[in-house]
Image: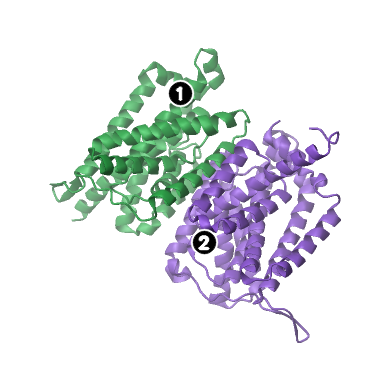
Amino acid sequence: MSDSAISQRLGSGKTMLRSRPMGYFLAALCIIALPLIFNDTYWRTNLTICAINVLLALGLDFILGYTGQLNLGHSAFYGLGAYVSTLLIIKLGIPFWAAFVAGVAFAGLAGMFLSLFAVRLRGHYLAIASLGFAVIIYQILLNWISLTQGPLGIYGISPPPAIVVGGTVIADFRNLTAFFYLVSGFTLLVYLLLDQLVRSPVGETLTAIREDEVSAASLGINGAAWKVFAFGLGAAVAGAAGCFYASFVGTLVPDAFYVNEAFTILAMVIVGGMGTLIGPVFGAILLTLLPEILRGMGDLRLVVYGAALTFVVLFMPGGLVQAARMVQDKLRPGGRGS
Amino acid sequence: MTTTIVLQQAINGVVFGSLYVLVALGLTLIYGVLVQINFAHADFVTLGAFAAYFFMHLIGAGYILSIGVAFLVGAALGWLINASIFTPLRRKGNELLPLIATIGVSVMMQNLMLAWFGPIPYAFETQYSSQVIRFAGIFVSWQNIIIIAVSSVTIALLYAFMKFTFLGKALRAVSQDRETAGLMGINPNYLIMLTFVIASALAGMAGAMLAPVLVLTPFAGTSVIVKAFAIVIIGGFGNVEGTILAGLIVGLIESYTTQFLDPGLIDIVVFALLLLMLAIKPTGLIAERREENV
């Protein structure tokens, strides 16, 4: 069975959750419950980082899993979102949410610009061009000192303004729990939108392009335009993650957006199962928490990322989703055979 | 004065350019035969450098011999990655999976080297680093002369191998059409293995020569590989002549950018060139001539 067939079969995630509204309800319940269960600063910080990584993985998965474009520069869009929104707030005094929209739009346009270059070529060209793009963005952030303060970084970035209705504070984002609800709520919303999109005719168009662009073109599908659109959307989601990251951590240094970050996000998508939306969610959660648990191992804990990436591709190309399905099939003999 | 600077930087550019050519040639050979990219190629450069360093400093062997050791270490790594990653994944027929798997290998190797060798740069000094020839106001170290000489001889040998020997011709046949070559009695699996061994040996060797002129850290190869990727695209994927030309151009761009602009701009200039190439002429510098030959 080819990998695309696996991911296609897994794509109809109906067996994972009995019904979608139920699944979203459970997810929302989890999001509400998590910070109440983990009530120390360390784990609440990790939870928010998890939510940001889930957002990044979803964006990359939409580009890689649904249109087959290997983007090795996802860190660049993440960094653009973070720096553009922060600089607009600090230098021009623009309100947070306006800067957020600008950061997202900028990252999305950058993604479309990059995709335009390589969209006519083989997958490898885009992989290298996007890697090069990530290197350029990193070097610009590092060397344009008058704007970004280079390696010294930007400090004291404030969190989003509190939501106040009629004089009462509803959500103060200096509070870790409120911030977690903000990011994970946004992530759930993005998931919902992407899920609707990939199950709509647009999703089928994208899958057709991924499987066979020439045949898709013969049906009147403009493959290049759709690929540019998908790349832009995925990059915009990464931009949103960047805006949240900057206001959450309060500090921006270029090293946070080095190319390694792109490989980390790639590992999350692959380990979870590319071409499904639920897979990268669990991939991101697993690969964010695993190194925290393995912190005692020092430098060796990053080896885990590399090993996970390699062994999943070699032995379980459908990732966690494929593993879950195999377990499910084992538990239900006489159920769906493959 | 300015002429001296221009000449001096030209020599520096050729030194780095010829090393980039060695690294990029490996990538382009593999791409030519298999239409695949080995992302861990960078770490073969680094590991070659460390092998040469430890061979010299622990055993006390000469520098030239340790270049040979790096060559062998690279060759072994090439055999290993082909057997463990590329051969099993070839059956799956997905063009991007091997690239993703080798990114994983690269992350693993880098962090293992970081754990073993530490982040502090090693001072890889050879007896040739300090011996300098002065000629008309230009300084050339013996180290640089060795780099240029060894690289040119290696590239010439590789070129002769590809052009004149039976194996070389078989290799070119496989890269043109693997199935037809198989029908002519050429074993493509053997030749793919051979390509990985040669390509990776070149990377290891480049590492041994690069480390004395650059810094030796677990990430030494990464700084080079990004440029090597750019060179491969600028020169035309799978094209040996184009790669050599593009490698020297990138080396010169780098040394002149350092001299006249700012060292921080090197990657930006190189990748602006890469994007420009993709937009204008994605087949690379020399590909057109090749198409006429067909």
Q: Chain of mark 1?
A: B
Q: Colour of chain A?
A: purple
Q: Which residue position holds label 2?
A: A256
Query: In this orientation, does residue B147 appear?
Result: yes
Asked if residue A163 is positioned above or below residue B179 in the image, the reply reads below
Query: In this orientation, does residue B289 appear?
Result: no
Q: Is residue B273 left or right of residue A50?
A: left
Helix, strand or loop for disc 1: helix
Asked if residue B279 is positioned above or below residue A24 in the image, the reply reads above
Residue at figure coordinates x 31%, y 57% from the top left: B260
What's the amino acid at mark 2?
Ala
Res B267 label: none
Q: Colour of chain B?
A: green
Q: Is residue A153 left or right of residue A24?
A: left
Number of the front mark, 2 or 1: 2
- Rendered location of residue B167, percent (x, y): 41, 19
Residue at figure coordinates x 71%, y 64% from the top left: A184
Instruction: Give the quadrant of the N terminus of chain A.
Output: top right
- Rendered location of residue B113, percent (x, y): 42, 47
The answer to which of A41 and B27 lies nearer the viewer is: A41
Res B293 label: 1
The answer to which of A12 and A94 lies nearer the viewer is: A12
- Rendered location of residue A94, percent (x, y): 61, 76
| Residues packed near mark 2 inside 10 Å, few (<14), some (14 to 19) or many (20 plus) | some
Q: Chain of mark 2?
A: A
| Residues packed near mark 1 inside 10 Å, few (<14), some (14 to 19) or many (20 plus) | few
Task: Tell whether label 1 touches label 2 (CB within 8 Å).
Answer: no
What's the amino acid at mark 1?
Asn
